Image (cartoon, helix red, strand yellow):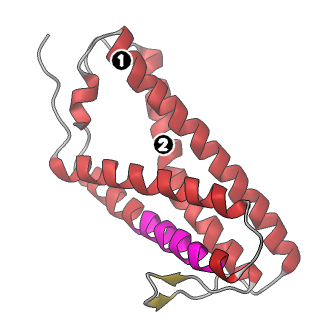
Amino acid sequence: MTPPLRYPFPARLLHWLMALMIMAGLALGYYLSSLPDAADKQALMTVHQSNGVAVLLLAFVRLGWRMGNPPPPLPDSTLWWERAIARAVHLQLYLLMIALPLSGWLMSSAKGHSVVFLGLVTLPDLVAADPALFDTLKGAHGQLAFVTVVLIALHLAGVVKHQLLDKDTLLARMR
């Protein structure tokens, strides 16, 4: 079996950097949801928000890269349904890399708390403070986070399938 074409270094770097940032953001968000409102929660919330803004910015960088640099082709042995699932999961992950941070920004705006990126730049509020809208956006943000976890699990299940069951070299494309 010939080794697969690898993704170029910038694509691999963005993939793994964003994977770590998304996992950290999900874990921190889950932890934050268990804390009562307090000053120490706000400090962690600022870290969570900065991470989300960075994910949002990097998602656009990643999309720009992807538009000019298509991924290497899948092996010929990849079945049609595997291709369809991979395409659907990747598309939804890209959408969530934008929708999840954006929903958090909207939620913070509706709460009346501006998002401060890295403690340096105060982002404009996207909506006026509105407790009812905040509650709706909080629910949406939580649901988007849940869907993100499910899609990451599907993505990882595909990796495990290819690595352990198929014993193909698909994983080597992103190493």
> Which quadrant: the N terminus?
top left
Determine which of the numbered discs, if any, sits on residue 118 in the image: none
The residue nearer to you, when weighing 27 against 101, is 27
The residue nearer to you, when weighing 94 against 43, is 43
| Residue 160: quarter of image | top left
Q: Label 1: few (<14), some or many (≥20) within 10 Å? A: some
Residue drawn 59% across and 67% down? 102
The residue that disc 2 covers is 91
Residue 3 percent coordinates (x, y): 13, 21
Residue 50 included in the magenta stretch of the image: yes
Residue drawn 53% across and 43% down? 92
Residue drawn 60% across and 37% down? 150
Residue 14 percent coordinates (x, y): 30, 54
Instruction: Tell me the magenta residue range.
Output: 42-57
The residue that disc 1 covers is 162
| Residue 161: quarter of image | top left
What's the residue type where badge 2 is placed? Leu
Q: Is residue 73 visible?
A: no
* Label located before the other in sequence (1 or 2): 2
Give the mark toward the camera: 1 or 2.
Answer: 1
Q: Is residue 13 above or below residue 47?
A: above
Residue 151 percent coordinates (x, y): 55, 37
Magenta span main SS:
helix
Give left or right: position of 32 versus 14. right
Residue 87 percent coordinates (x, y): 44, 33
| Residue 108: quarter of image | bottom right
Marks 1/2: CA distance? 20 Å
